[in-house]
Image (tube, grey):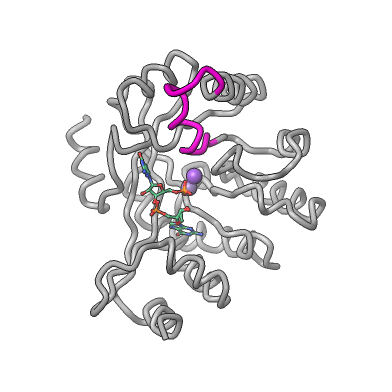
Amino acid sequence: QLELELGDEIRNGDGLYLSYQPSFDPSGEVMLGVEALCRWRHPVRGEVPPTIFIPLAENSGLIHLLGEWVLRNACRQATEWPELKVAVNVSPQQFKRIGFVDLVRRVLGETGLDPRQLEIELTESILVNDLQTAEAQLAELKKIGVRLALDDFGTGYSSLSYLLALPFDRLKIDRSFVTRVQSSARGAAVVHSIISLGRALGMQVTAEGVDTPEQHKFLRVAGVHAFQGYLFSRPVEAGEISERLAAQK
Ligand code: G
Ligand code: G
Ligand code: MN
Ligand code: NA
């Protein structure tokens, strides 16, 4: 039932929208980019959490339609924010589908967005089963000029050597590691090593889910480039991002 409603919503509803969570430079004051996060305001149920409707879309095939909607809307919006990078989450099914790279190229063309502003967020699970195809696909995306981010880093099962041979521009340290930096020496050591690995390989390193000043300080000293989390900002609607950009000038 919910699945049918989601399909209608994507095709011709007005209940879907994007929230944008900013990321900041180490000072925590300058916005560097935003991550587009899909939201669904259901007429009867209210807000349906993405942890419900994203898996529903993935398991029903609707993720292709939904993903295209997200990509198009995020790219169109991003043209109003030339100073920001805009990150879009892409599910493994979308990434693996023939024609995904063409879709990205087409949406960039239609919206006129500078490819360098777009960051595609992928997780390690894209590497499961067919590493060769994934590598070729990543190379195609790099050719278009978009940036690639490895999301939820550290939570998957891929071999580190494989992962690090791939052309990712950014590594996003999963929230579960960030939570542990203050609580144990081991937690701190793991995060230190992720950061130095990313930096040594020339990647930008983002910390996700930063929600205390102590975590911020630890990560800043450890060399993290970009900060995302409730300490700085929750996801907000597009108008709010525009207002903050205006205030920042
Ligand atoms: O926004 P929130 O933290 O509640 O998101 C929950 C999960 O849903 C996260 O894993 C996030 O990556 C995912 N998600 C949110 N928006 C999108 C989207 O547009 N596409 C995909 N594939 N995942 C999304
Ligand atoms: O899997 P992904 O990293 O794309 O998930 C992003 C999700 O993380 C969003 O749903 C967002 O609301 C959530 N999020 C972002 N910052 C924080 C934070 O500081 N604390 C918690 N608990 N969740 C966060
Ligand atoms: Mn993400
Ligand atoms: Na993440």
* Residue 141, position as x, y percentages in the image: 65, 50
Q: Position of residue 205 (x, y in %)?
A: 52, 29
Quarter of the image with the C terminus is top left
Q: Residue at x 79, y 57 (%)?
A: 129
Where 6 falls versus 222 (above or below)? Answer: below
Q: Is residue 135 above or below residue 27?
A: below
Q: Residue furthest front?
A: 184
Residue 181 vs residue 110, the one in the foreground = 181
Q: Is residue 151 visible?
A: yes
Picture coordinates of residue 160 (x, y %)? 73, 34
**Residue 173 magenta-highlighted:** yes
Point out the image quarter for the N terminus.
bottom left
Residue 156 is a magenta residue: no
Residue at (54%, 43%) from the top-left corner?
Answer: 152
Q: Is residue 114 visible?
A: no
- Please state the extent of the stretch shown in magenta in the rendering: 172-186
